[in-house]
Image (spheres, rainbow, N blue to C red):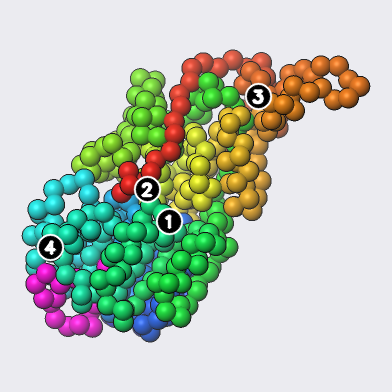
Amino acid sequence: MMDLPKVLVNRLTDMGITDPTPIQKRAIPHALNGEDVMGLAQTGTGKTAAFGLPLVTLMLKYGRKPAKGVVRSLILAPTRELAQQIAETLKTLTENTPIKVAIVVGGVSINPQIKRLERGVDVLVATPGRLLDLMDRKAVDLEECSFLVLDEADQMLDLGFIHALRKIAGVLPKDRQTMLFSATMPKQMNEIAQSYLNNPKRIEVSPPGKTADKVTQAIHFIAKAEKTNLLIELLDGHREERAIVFGRTKYGCEKLARVLEKAGYATAAVHGNKSQGQRERAIAAFKAGEVKVLVATDVAARGLDIPDVKHVYNYELPNVPDAYVHRIGRTARAGKDGAAIAFCAPDEMDELRAIQKTIGQQIPVASGRPWQPLEEEAKPPRGKGPRRGGNRGGNRGGPQGGPGAKPGGGNNRRRRGSKRGGKPSPRSAA
């Protein structure tokens, strides 16, 4: 299989993996040839293995253990959850091999991580903040690190991480192999990326920003005060299926999780105010099916690879349109199908327009009508009387039929309650 060593081919066969995905088929040969790679593909299409398999193959060629304190290859990820997911995947792939994989992230004690690094590491998976802490303590040696991988490269090259990335890249050997992988790559990020790559092979198996093929999308135009009760109504239609609900702020997600728990849903919250242990336990319970609803900020938009997530709710639309692509990529993974339902309040229309421009499509309307600016609403058409109805009072009339849509919707349906949220910073995500 693509000139991979027999030990890896056997391991993949044991895992039930026999055919490479498009991004793997096109990226792995270039990576094995020592070329720099920029890989762009939808979420859930096997990007971790696309850089992980060639990286492990190259590590096996050393034929000896790394020296004490030495890191041979480095994978940087923007969030703890993604770093954990990558490390788990690589540890699974490297069973029955001498390859040593380690992970360093914030939110947990640094001392065990220092002791682990003392023994030397073939592959280190890290978040930038914790890696800088270790560098400041002289606890990690990157001078022999010949391979750098940036996963979710668009976020790694954003303002929240670019200064840390420059410091880290500055101590790595200039003669190294670099690979960048992401589902989205805005133009300005692409320009910055070129400064870290040497004549890279650009592998693009789908247009940047394209959503997963098997995700069925829908949007409800609904007032803020109506969102919580609509969410409860929709969740009630699939109580035994896993769902992720995305909000903007840590406080808002925690508050919403408590409301859902009181409503009888097995719920957990994941956000930057949770300790690493709390976040790991919540995700483990969600994977095991003990928790059915995970309420999260964008710390969970990248790195959660749980094939059985059937529903993703954008309770609040993200301020950054690319985040929508990553959020809904938590469903319809590994060839399965899923539903992505978004709620749009009047003050979120700008976010919706930006999202639809990014994904290159209009999201089908499940209920309500697109909100109009208030000044347009207040001004009746020339020669006609005052406008009736409109978007006030819930905006629940209009086309029906998307995921979660129910017959008989309209402006007269009554709702109860309200919950709100805001936007996490890149620092809180890591």
Nearer the camera: disc 3 or disc 1: 1
Mark 1 or mark 2: which comes first in sequence?
A: 1
Mark 4 or mark 2: which comes first in sequence?
A: 4
Check the image and report above or below for 148 versus 152: below
From the viewer's side, name the closer residue of 22 and 171: 171
Q: Which residue is mark 4?
A: 139
| Within-10-Å neighbours for mark 3: few <14, some 14–19, many 20+ | many
Check the image and report above or below for 57 versus 134: below
Q: How many marks?
A: 4
Range drawn in magenta: 59-74
Q: Secondary structure at mark 2?
A: helix
In the image, what residue type sits under mark 1? Asp
Residue 66 percent across, percent down from the top left = 14, 75
Mark 2 or mark 3: which comes first in sequence?
A: 3
| Marking on residue 426 | 2
Q: Which residue is mark 3?
A: 395
Quick check: can you spot residue 337? no
Mark 1 in CB contact with mark 2 (< 8 angstroms): yes
Q: CA distance from mark 2 to mark 3?
A: 34 Å
